[in-house]
């Protein structure tokens, strides 16, 4: 059976993680690999509706628990409809955000317990977690300057919240059980992409993928 691998990209908004997701997916597809790309929250019909509520319904009040569970619900559907079948086919799955973001935004920055969210996340995903997460890190001022668009619900919560988000990502990355590689997002996108390949290519080879440069 063809090897399958699940990668997720995460980090504070403005680090270029979505751009790097697209660049890696294109790089792998150009070398003949079957790649399934997805975004969390979203990626399914119900996920798209939940994404609209979670990121863009500014006048809708959500408690931290409700917000966390809506993210979990979107992810559960994404796993069932997209990620699990793709892994079963032997695809490389690349997800723009995943459970780590839920833990960081709603626990480290939102006041819930991170252990509770990891446990709920294990249930919501059926235990399907990334083999490797790439965490793109950038100082808050630089990340804000890069956004170039209006802030969504999660991005408009102020400096103190954003600082907790970044600290939460780095805290989780320090735990080797989470399988997180931190990528400096400060250089130009092409340089960051090369740094991503330096991490991802050896990892994919270890997982059994034949990767040509």
Image (tube, helix red, strand yellow):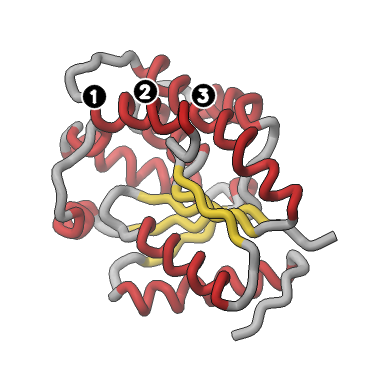
Q: Which residue is mark 1?
A: 57
Q: Is residue 187 above or below residue 4?
A: below
Q: Mark 3 and 1 residues: CB-CB less than 8 Å, in contact?
A: no
Residue drawn 31% across and 24% down? 53
Q: Is residue 173 above or below residue 75?
A: below
Mark 1 crowdedness (10 Å alpha carbons): few <14, some 14-19, many ≥20: some
Q: Is residue 84 above or below residue 176?
A: above
* Image mark for residue 111: 2
Q: Position of residue 161 (x, y in %)?
A: 24, 34
* Image mark for residue 73: 3
Measure the alpha-carbon separation of dots 2 and 1: 21 Å
Mark 3 crowdedness (10 Å alpha carbons): few <14, some 14-19, many ≥20: some
Q: Nearer the viewer, residue 182 or 75?
A: 75
Q: Mark 2 and 3 residues: CB-CB less than 8 Å, in contact?
A: no
Quadrant housing the N terminus: bottom right
For label 3, the SS is helix
Residue drawn 64% across and 59% down? 92
Dot placed on the residue nearer the N-terminal end, 3 or 1: 1
**Along the horizontal axis of the image, is 189 left or right of 69?**
left
**Along the horizontal axis of the image, is 177 left or right of 190?**
right
Residue drawn 44% across and 60% down? 21
Quadrant housing the C terminus: bottom right
């Amino acid at each position: 059976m063809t090897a399958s691998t699940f990668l997720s990209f995460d980090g504070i908004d403005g680090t270029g993680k979505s751009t790097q997701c697209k660049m890696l997916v294109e790089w792998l597809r150009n070398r003949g690999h079957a790649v399934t790309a997805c975004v969390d929250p979203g990626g399914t019909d119900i996920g798209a509706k939940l994404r609209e509520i979670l990121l863009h319904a500014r006048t809708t009040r959500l408690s931290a628990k409700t917000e966390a569970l809506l993210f979990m619900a979107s992810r559960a559907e994404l796993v069932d409809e997209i990620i699990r079948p793709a892994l079963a086919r032997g695809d490389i799955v690349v997800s723009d955000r995943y459970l780590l973001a839920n833990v960081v935004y709603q626990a480290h920055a939102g006041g819930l317990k991170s252990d509770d969210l990891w446990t709920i996340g294990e249930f919501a995903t059926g235990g399907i977690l990334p083999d490797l997460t790439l965490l793109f890190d950038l100082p808050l001022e630089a990340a804000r300057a890069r956004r170039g668009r209006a802030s969504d619900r999660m991005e408009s919560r102020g400096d103190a919240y954003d600082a907790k988000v970044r600290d939460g990502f780095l805290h989780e990355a320090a735990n080797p059980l989470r399988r997180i590689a931190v990528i400096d997002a400060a250089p130009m996108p092409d340089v960051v992409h090369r740094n991503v390949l330096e991490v991802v290519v050896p990892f994919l080879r270890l997982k059994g993928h034949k990767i040509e440069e």
